[in-house]
Amino acid sequence: MSDKIGINSDKEGLEYNFAGVGDASGEDGIIKEQDRLLPIANVGRIMKQILPPNAKISKEAKETMQECVSEFISFVTGEASDKCHKEKRKTVNGDDICWALTTLGFDNYADQLKSYLHRYREQEAERANHNRAGNHEEKEETSNYRGQLPRRSAVLPSTPLKFNAIDRSNSSLSRPF
């Protein structure tokens, strides 16, 4: 619940003043719109991915979607943040976001995000193991004539992650992104 711009109060009556925190606020303590919203170019790019190639998107449609997605992210993150606050933690993680989505009734999105989060963590573990193995091998190699170790490429091939849009008309997962 928001009483004033930059000051939010939670369900327990505690107030949080975000005005003046970091560079996100103006000189008078009001959060600038550019710091509150996702970049409109990014929103437009995401919108275009699902539309046919010849489709056009009006500026008004992009701005409306920009407001909606920014509000949605704030709504979910706020719920996750409240959970962390109650648990006396300062960092919101992916599991907290999944919990918040489920709590707020977005079960289909939470399931998709849990699946993505699991695959992301697996890839990060593989990358870390690969880097660890690569670092160990580099230590055993001999240096070249200038006393430098040869360069190694530690890039792993990544598999693209696919998300499905939810079609509310028949409640089945449909178009892949």
Image (cartoon, grey):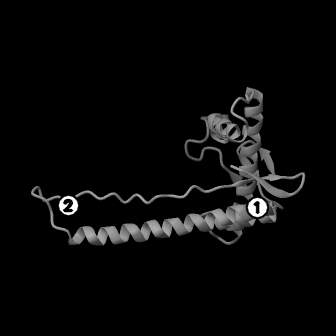
Q: Earlier in the sequence, mark 1 or mark 2?
A: 1
Tell which of 123 and 41 is nearer to you.
123
When the figure is inspected, residue 119 is found, relative to residue 176, above or below; the finding is: below
Asked whether residue 29 is in view, the answer is: no
**Residue located beneath label 1 in the image:** 101
Which residue is located at x 27 percent, y 71 percent?
137
Residue 164 sits in which quadrant?
bottom right
Q: Nearer the viewer, residue 147 or 137?
A: 137
- Tell me the amino acid under the disc marked 1: Leu
Residue occupying image coordinates x 29% and y 72%: 136
The answer to whether 147 is drawn above or below residue 46 in the figure is: below
**Would you call the spot at circle 2 few (<14 residues within 10 Å), some (14-19), or many (20 or more)?**
some
Q: Quadrant of residue 133?
A: bottom left
Query: Mark number for residue 149?
Result: 2
Q: Could you tell me if the residues under marks 1 and 2 are in contact, i.e. CB atoms within 8 Å? A: no
**Residue 77 horizontal side relative to residue 121, left or right:** right
**Depth check, front residue: 122 or 104:** 122
Numbered badge on residue 51: none
Mark 1, Cα crowd under 10 Å, few <14 / some 14-19 / many 20+, is many
Q: Report the side of 175 relative to 40 (left or right).
A: right
The disc labelled 2 sits on which kind of residue?
Leu
Residue 76 image point, x, y percent: 74, 56
Residue 114: x %, y % from top left: 68, 66
State how far apart marks 1 and 2 are (Cα): 48 Å
Q: Give the number of the mark in front: 1 or 2.
A: 2
